Each structure stands twice: as structure tokens, then as C-alpha cells.
Image: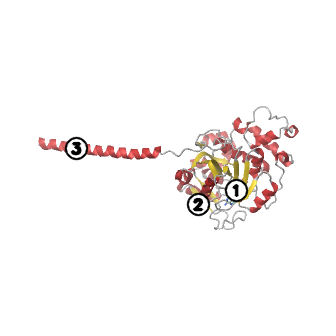
Amino acid sequence: MSMSFGANLLRTFRVLGIGIFVLITFKFMFSKQILDCDTARPPMLTTSSLPLKTQEPFHFEGFTPVSVSLGANPAVLDRAMKAPGCQLPLLCAWSVATQVRDEEFLKTTATYHLFLRKQGDQKALDTGGSNFQHGPVGEQGLEVMRDRLNDLYEEKKLADLSLPLLSIPSNIHVIPMGAEPYFRRTLRDADMVLEGLWLAGVIPHHGSWLDFGGSHGRVTRVLASAFPQAEWHCSDPILDSIDWGKSNIQNVHFHQSEQDPPMSGFSSGQLDGVYAISIWSHYSEESALAWFHEMHRILKPGGILWFSTHGFQSINYGSLDGAVQKSHREEMLAALYLTGFFYFPMFGAKGDWHLSDGAQGTKWGFAAMTTEWLAARLLNVDRRWTLLYFGPGRNEKNQDVYVLRRT
Ligand SMILES: C[S@@+](CC[C@H](N)C(=O)[O-])C[C@H]1O[C@@H](n2cnc3c(N)ncnc32)[C@H](O)[C@@H]1O
């Protein structure tokens, strides 16, 4: 009895010992795999020719908590209350992307640079006692400067800055702007691009830059006038926009681009940066990826891609009367949660601005993406891009802003 008890005990210990050995071996192998995976670093980034504020790899701008955002801005409460989808916390959380007030940034804006260039003309700058030559710019100062520059533009007093008053015929493409004057909104959009770049640590005052899908050169010409040391290009598939831009805007290089890649007008590694205001907000999933790859080709190593597109924040915005995606809100929400991408052929077969995509509107319509989709389908695939900055709702509290660096 005691013999067999002892033998059993011995057998138990042996089995336990083998078990523990097997467990430790497995744990070691398994954790080593994870460790290998974790330590597989992305390749070193090539330094760009662009001046960089910081080399920080990624700046994520999180959603502002509801209570804070609502408390901080009653206008936001008004809009958020209109959102019937408020049962979901994310939908209620307007990001309220507050504009950068950093004095250093304000002095890199197109508005400030154009204003400075008018400083010789003190009479033109007289804004009723405000003097911007001394003291800080301040966000309020920037708004006043935009008002003043808009007046000067409409009074045809910015021609010396290569910004003559343009009379744009109704057959030439211009984005819808609501009540805000054309030039004022354009100044804001130019500064919006600069703001995202600034938050990503990039200052585009030199190098060669492309406004991809830049229409008739609306934003391009403001940046070209503010930063004449850089080289500015504008591409768009609508021939009328490009031809009109060529005839009316002298300091921008215009290119008619193809609706699908490749872009014949640009050689590999030609550009320091590309920005695209509301372009990926239209591409189907396949086209979005194809165009990211094309941007990779035409950018220099270390080059920058700024783009804005719809995302979760647009669902909140889309609940507002008149928003283009209102009827597709639920479908869009489900698609973003399930797959990270949403597309519907908003323009149908006839196309946007009569520019049919040749595929029954299946390539260019209404699109939205999540950061997870971008990470899974682009950033993590072969590490050809690094995400430098993500700002939800930074384009008119609707589209998200992304800044990528080509590796
Ligand atoms: C929403 S508008 C934005 C225009 C311009 N970025 C702006 O802010 O004034 C979209 C622009 O994309 C252009 N576009 C249409 N199809 C395109 C395509 N397949 N690739 C690039 N741009 C396209 C349109 O002609 C139009 O100028």
C-alpha cells in the first residue's frame, strides 16, 4: 500500500514536472514570438528637405469629452442637441478642434504672411485702431486680419501680392461656401492646411508642393502668394478648371490630372509635399488605396501628405439639416464600426460636375474612413507611410485631417 502510494506520488511528480517543463518551454517560445514581433521596428525615416519643427512621430488629437466641449462652447450644445443619434457617446462628442493659438504658429499662417507683406501700405491696413505690427497676433487678430484682407481683395488692392480679384464664371468649379466670402474662406482653408502641417511638425515655406484636386487653384494661389519661395502646383481632372486657372493665376503650375492613377504630370520623387482638401472624402476603398500608392510614388522620401476625409465626426455633422450624408448616417455608422470604410455612389453614373468616373460612380462618390482602417490597410502593410498627425473634425468640424510622412 505504502509502496504503491510512494510510486504513485513519484509518478505524479514526474507528470507534473514534465507538464511544468512543457509549459515553460511553450511560454518561452510564445513570448519570444511576441517579443520578436514587438521589437520589429519600422525602418528609420529619411530626413526630408523640409524644415521640421519636431521629429515627433505621431500626434493624436483625441475627442474632447462631451461635458467639457458643451460647457466650453454653447454653440456646440445647440448643434449637438440636434443630433438624433446622441445615444452613442461618440456621436455626442464633438471634437471642437480648437484652433491653434500658439503665437509661433500664427506667424506661419498665410493670413499673417500676406498681412505682413501689406505692411508697407499702412493706410490699407488701418483697421480702426488695431495695430498688428507690434504686440502678439492672437487668434482674434488673425480673424480681423482675414476680414481686412478680404476687404482689400474685394477692393482689388491685393494685385501687388499676385492676388487680383478673380471673377469666376459659373461654369468653373468652386466648392460650396455658405455665407462666408470666397477669399476669406480660402484664407481659412489655406491656414487649415498649414495648421495640420504645423501640428505634424512641418512648415511648408520651401520645396515643391501640390494641391491635389485643387479645383481652379483656389487655395493654391493663396499659399503661392504667401510663400513665393516655394514652388506650387495644382492638379485637377476637370479641364475647364485647369485651363481657367492657367489663364488667370500666374504663380501656380497647373496640371490636368487623370481620374485614376498614375499621374502623368509628375515624375517619381518629384514633390516635397501634397495636400488634398476633401479628395479622399470621395474615393471608393480601391481608389483610395490606389491614390495613396500614387502619392507615395510622386513624393520624395520623407515627403508629406496632408489630406482630409470623412470619419466618425462626419456622422455627427451629418445629422445636421442639409448635410449631404444625412440619409446615410445609420449605414455609415455601421460600416465604419464593422469595416472601417464607407462608400456610396453619391453622384451616380452622371458623375460629380459632369465628370463621370467611367464606372457608374463606383470610384468617386461619398467616402469615410477610420484611423483603424488606415492603419490596417495602409500604414501597417509595408510601413511605407508614418502617421504624423490625426485631427478629428479639423476641416469645418466635419472631415478629419491626417498628415502622413512617406518613408
Ligand atoms: C470637394 S472639391 C475640392 C476642391 C479643392 N480641393 C478646394 O478645396 O477648393 C473636389 C475636387 O476634386 C476633383 N476631382 C474629381 N475627381 C477626382 C479624382 N478622381 N481625383 C482627384 N480629384 C478629383 C474635382 O474636380 C474637384 O475640384
Q: Are marks 1 and 2 in contact (CB under 8 Å)?
A: no
Counting residues from the start of the chain, the first of labels 3 and 1 encountered is 3
Residue corresponding to mark 3 = 14
Assign a secondary structure to mark 2: helix
Q: Check the picture and name the quadrant holding the N terminus.
A: top left
Q: Which residue is mark 2?
A: 286
Residue 163: x %, y % from top left: 82, 49
| Disc 1 residue lies near ligand 1 with CB under 8 A | yes
Residue in the picture at 85% in, 46% down? 160
- Decide: few, some or many residues near mark 3? Use Cα within 10 Å; few <14, some 14-19, many ≥20: few
The first of marks 3 and 2 along the sequence is 3
Q: Give the CA distance from mark 3 to mark 1.
A: 72 Å
Question: Within 10 angstroms of label 2, few (less than 14), some, or many (20 or more) residues?
Answer: few
Ligand 1 closer than 8 Å to label 2 CB: no
Instruction: State the residue position of label 1.
Output: 213
Give, as a three-letter code, the residue at label 3.
Answer: Arg
Q: Is residue 51 left or right of residue 143?
A: left
Rendered view: 105 above or below 309: above
Using the rendered image of the protein, determine whether residue 181 is visible from the camera's viewpoint: no
